[in-house]
Amino acid sequence: MRVCLASTSPARLMLLRQAGIEPVTLAPDVDEEAIIAAVESAEDRTLQPAEYVLLLARRKAADVASRLAAAEPDFDGIVIGGDSMFVLDGEILGKPYTPEAATARWHDMRGRTGVLHSGHSVIRLRPGSAPAEEHAVAEASVTFAADVTDDEIDAYVATGEPLHVAGAFTIDSLGGPFIEQVVGDPSTVVGMSLSTLRRLVRRLGVAWPDTWTSS
């Protein structure tokens, strides 16, 4: 069973590798801001976080699946797309990008709990059959240590790690020691919920062990 990850995220790739899967990776060609703006304009409302991440996950997977099917008509496997966002007290916290924004973010987050929303889309491709898709959203709450010092925040920000990740933190690297509790599938916080992926894959008629590279 071949697996394609519709993402160039190192964290998502690492998760799949740890789960026994060595996927090919293709970057989705989607304008995320334009997609969200178009849908919100058409529906005259602001998308909720779960709707936001699911919409983008599905568009990413669909884009890559379409290009992959055209380039490799004999592809027999699955395409996985995902998107994540972190929400604290109703405020969406994306990637901070600058040290100043990351520092301010951490001063605000310490001692508090937010929710990481992760959208998932899995598309089954097989020669001679129409694509089939399953999707879902996973959520995990994240509680940050209240005693994180200003010096620790400055040192963490100086590493550059929090600048380009949703919420300005990681759980699987340098940011992990500053997180006191995760409620939900921990892999959701890394980038994708492996338990959710397993359920989606099974709904598409694929046994999870068949995705393992060694199988």
Image (cartoon, rainbow, N blue to C red):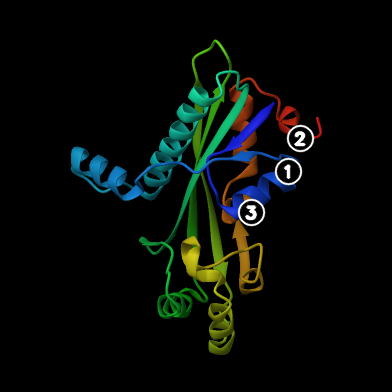
If you read the primary sequence from the N terminus, does the residue marked by circle 3 or circle 1 appear first?
Answer: 1
Query: Which label number is shown at residue 19?
Result: 1
Q: Which mark is residue 29?
A: none
Q: Quadrant of residue 98?
A: bottom left
Residue in view at x 62 percent, y 25 percent: 77
Q: Quadrant of the C terminus?
A: top right
According to the picture, the residue beneath numbered tag 3 turns out to be: 186
Q: Position of residue 63 (x, y in %)?
A: 43, 34
Q: Nearer the viewer, residue 60 or 43?
A: 60
Q: Identify the residue under disc 2.
A: 213
Residue at the bottom extreme? 151
Displayed quadrant of residue 74: top right
Residue 97 relative to residue 80: left or right: left
Q: Look at the numbered discs 1 and 2 and tell me whether their residues touch, using CB distance below 8 Å.
A: no
Residue placed at 48% from the left, 58% from the top? Answer: 115
Residue 125: percent from the left, percent from the top? Answer: 56, 22
- Marks 1/2: CA–CA distance: 10 Å
Q: Earlier in the sequence, mark 1 or mark 2?
A: 1
Instruction: Mark 1 vs mark 2: give the one in front.
Output: 2
Above or below, 82 relative to 125: below
Q: Position of residue 133 (x, y in %)?
A: 50, 25
| Secondary structure category for the residue under label 3 | helix
> Taking the image as drawn, is residue 182 in sight?
yes
Give SS at disc 2: loop
Q: Are marks 2 and 3 in contact (CB under 8 Å)?
A: no
Q: Amino acid at mark 2?
A: Thr
Q: Outermost residue, right direction?
A: 214
The alpha-carbon separation of the residues under discs 3 and 1 comes to: 13 Å
Q: Which one is in front, 105 or 129?
A: 129
